[in-house]
Amino acid sequence: MLTNNLIKELNNTLPKSNILSGIEERYVYSIDASNDPYIKSQIPDAVVFVENIEQVQQVVKIANKHMTPIICRGAGTNTVGACVATHGGIILNFSKMNKILEINAENMTARVQPGVIVGDLQKAVEDIGLFYPPDPSNLKVSTIGGSIAQNSAGARCFKYGATKDYVIDMLVVMADGQLIRTGSNTIKNATGYNLGSLFIGSEGTLGIVVEATLKLITKPQTSQVIMAYFDKIEDSIKSVNKIIEKQICPTTIDFMDQNAIQTVEKFYPTGLLCDKESALIIEIDGYETYIEELRKTICNILRENKASSIQFSKNKQEADHIWTARRSSMAACTKLKPNVTTDDVIVPRQNLAKLVKGIQEICKRHNLTVCMVGHVGDGSVHPQIPIDYNDKDEYRHYKIAKSEIYHLTVKLDGIISGEHGIGLEKKAYISKVVEGGALDYMRQIKKIFDPKNILNPYKIF
């Protein structure tokens, strides 16, 4: 619990309207999108809304003085318990630091505060002919700060990469309140260590990102979405490999299994073909003169690899309709049970069909429904499992199935997170995929950056 002196210092430092201390207010911030009632979290002692860098530094200095945990929070959409308190402390909320500070068309960069919504940034830069590719499924609410903390990726990662590939500079508040700069305002930088790479994906355990400079690229002239259905999952995965073998690099290659197709169609009727075992959503982009030829080439490859039905968008509205259906998969699962869990495992693409079939078999053995979607272009799969947390027997089977899925992933030369992070949910499994020596160095880095262990403590390992 926070001491009275610490609360008093916070009230003297920030406007009182920026501090939540009521039990009901604090309870709201004791969970994130993982929403697992059995996760070892606590109600935070205070929730602080910061408005500028100086306020962040002041709060951190107070927390450092009193050895009080600080947990940064954007939109709380992460699914691994990465932004919940485990030992009380302060939730640092960045929703008021949500300004796009600068878009520099000449340098092709954007300078933003951590609370900026990913989708808002994308729209702003696309209006002037530029492009910020990373697109987490919840981009309408997820923030740049959260994306940096988890190294978010999304469907476009196959062609354009993840968040880490677009962050060229950051201002970071360290555990003692010191402000450091990690990079430069240049696209290339070979000056000293790439310090920024340590903070990206560190889940707020090493420092607090208070500003980021992001690389932008030119906006593709046009795009089109192809949706192909298959009677066998293996054929859909084979098609992905054949497309790549032809030296074609689509913007996205996403996947839905039959359960996901059927569940989404009930939730968001789009005309999906529910009798098919799987579907691929392939987006292509580039020059208008090139798109039609590229689409025809891809469709020919799909037919050669037993696609039983192929559809494609004829305008942006139709493309958005398809993507809305795909992005609705987790929300659709909530119609099946009171709760829904989602995971994030990734294997080399050559083992992808084995992973998908294996997850289906594991869930069937434990009498669990699983709706699978994923970014199969890069080997990533998201098993979404509807569950009733109040059914203790079902929850027990879910936990066993989860462990078996991770074991299968490791057996197939994969890792337990490609873009969601580790947080609390997966920390017990990290030693299965990261060898001991590397983990020891990670712990040493944590101690150097955060000697009092106040920055999002007890996450990752």
Image (cartoon, rainbow, N blue to C red):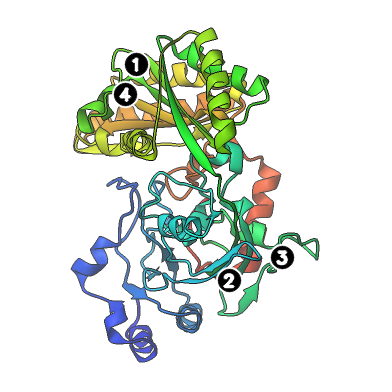
Element under label 1?
Answer: helix
Percent from the top left, x then y, of residue 390?
19, 38
Q: Which residue is mark 2?
A: 172
Nearer the observer: mark 4 or 3; the answer is 3
Q: Quadrant of residue 215?
A: bottom right
Residue 10 against residue 175 in the figure, above or below: below
Element under label 4?
Answer: helix
Give the crowd class for mark 4: few <14, some 14-19, many >=20 residues within 10 Å. many
Give the crowd class for mark 3: few <14, some 14-19, many >=20 residues within 10 Å. few
Using the numbered discs, state the Cα–Cα distance from disc 2 to disc 1 in whole angstroms: 47 Å
Q: Which residue is mark 4?
A: 261
Nearer the observer: mark 2 or 1; the answer is 2
Nearer the observer: mark 2 or 3; the answer is 3
Q: Which of marks 3 and 1 precedes in the sequence?
A: 3
- Residue 186: image tag: 3
Q: Which of marks 4 and 2 precedes in the sequence?
A: 2
Amino acid type indicated by mark 2: Val
